Amino acid sequence: MKKIKLLVAACLLVSAPAMAEESVPYNCDYSPSCEVAPGIYGAMKSPVTSKFNLSLGGYVKLDYVHNTNAVGPLSPVPGLPMTPPGQVSKDESLFTAKQSRIWFRVAGPTFMGAKTNALIEADFYGANSLSNEFGNVRMRHAYGSLDWTNTQVLFGQFWDIFTPAAADTIDFRQGGATGAPANPRVPQIRLTQKIKLGEGNGLRFVFGVQNPVQDAAVAGDNSMSKNGSFGSVVNAAGQIMFSSNALGVSPGFMGLGMSPLQIGVFGMAGSQKFTDGPAVDVYGYGAYGFVPILKSKDGKNRAMTLSLETQAYIAAGLDVQAATAQAVVNNTTPATRSAAKGYGLYGQLKFFPTQDLGITVGYGRRNALNYASYKNPAPATPVAGTFEKYNEMLYGNIHYDLNAAVRVATEYQYQRTQYSGPASNFGQNNTVRAAVYYFF
């Protein structure tokens, strides 16, 4: 009898974790699935023990890529390499999991009526590590914020304020260099102010100053006029956005949240100092729009929704954002040096036939302005005497959520970079991608 009691007790101890796990409503498992991904990637939040209220999350992502032009797992910046005459481009197939990421979010004590928050996020694409086995941790976001009802002060490293759009691609660059600038994450301090304009309508003003590394300055040479190169004064940037619930809401980025109608403008301005000549002004401005063409029936369900996102800009000297292909032109003498100018166009449609199935198609293009001014190209261009006239991408992808954690996706991209000179001066690439995500 004693042995039986011991055996029962042992069984209960072994089964206790399993029973406890079953009793916790972790995400869900039904069709249609609930919101995908916890924390900042969706609507759920799982606090863990810390000095303050701490949440963590992220996703594991495995990518398979096949390129008809061997350019690696990411679409290249500034442009595609040309295939030498008489040769054919080399294709490639590869896997990578370095796009996986993790984040920690903190909700701390209040200050003068404001909630205080902080977030640190990292992935494994640091230090240009090429080997998948040596993926280096890279800081993506690291910021703190003070949040009142309609006002936020944010400081730290966050998305570049210039241009709000990011193409909804499986490709990690998300349209960078093709009409949706790369949106680098830069140190900054920004103020966001919301103004309510009646029920369901409002304005959002964003103003900030941020790290000025956006041109040809290299690491270590970003201070004012150091080592004969050039540095920068702090850049100022801003956005003005009108939002309205008049058209309802439809899925936004990656289909992980709902967005209302948004229409706005954005801009950035700065000045680059040179040791051997006058300063060069850099700037950019443009317009952005998000339109729920077919709205969600209840504000949460994605079935039979359709979203349009579009953006256009003009920029000068903003090559680190990939808004322009290079920093300066006419660089043979200080007196003739000027910022390289260009424009970008981007648009995409996002359709959900069902709650779990999403289809996206889009197009983006970055184009040089005033070809005649490009008299001496950047050294990185593939053939002497050429410069990038335009860089474009056409893409389409499909993703399906197996449940609240697992997503599968596939994508086709066509990319082309046209250079000056003969019509044969171009590079192109056809890319097929497949990816599996596990959000946590």
Image: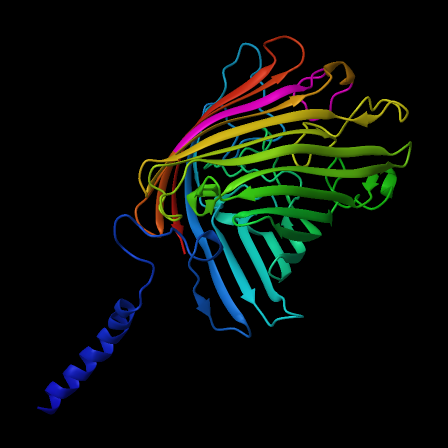
**Which corner quadrant holds the C terminus?**
bottom left
Residue in view at x 74 percent, y 42 percent: 213
**Could you tell me residue 430's position as x and y percent?**
46, 23
* 22 displayed left or right of 233: left
Residue in view at x 59 percent, y 10 percent: 424
Q: Seen from this angle, which residue lies furthest left?
A: 1
Residue 154 within the segment the image draws in magenta: no
* 335 displayed left or right of 363: right
| In the foreground, 374 or 4 | 374
**Could you tell me residue 429's position as x and y percent?**
50, 22
The colour scheme applied to this rendered structure is rainbow
Residue 229 makes an appearance in the image: no
The magenta segment is: 376-397
Q: In which quarter of the image is residue 319?
A: top right
Residue 381 within the segment the image draws in magenta: yes
Q: Seen from this angle, which residue lies furthest bottom?
A: 2
Q: Seen from this angle, which residue lies furthest top?
A: 422
Residue 341 makes an appearance in the image: yes
Q: Quadrant of residue 356?
A: top left
Residue in view at x 60 percent, y 40 percent: 164
**Which corner quadrant holds the N terminus?**
bottom left
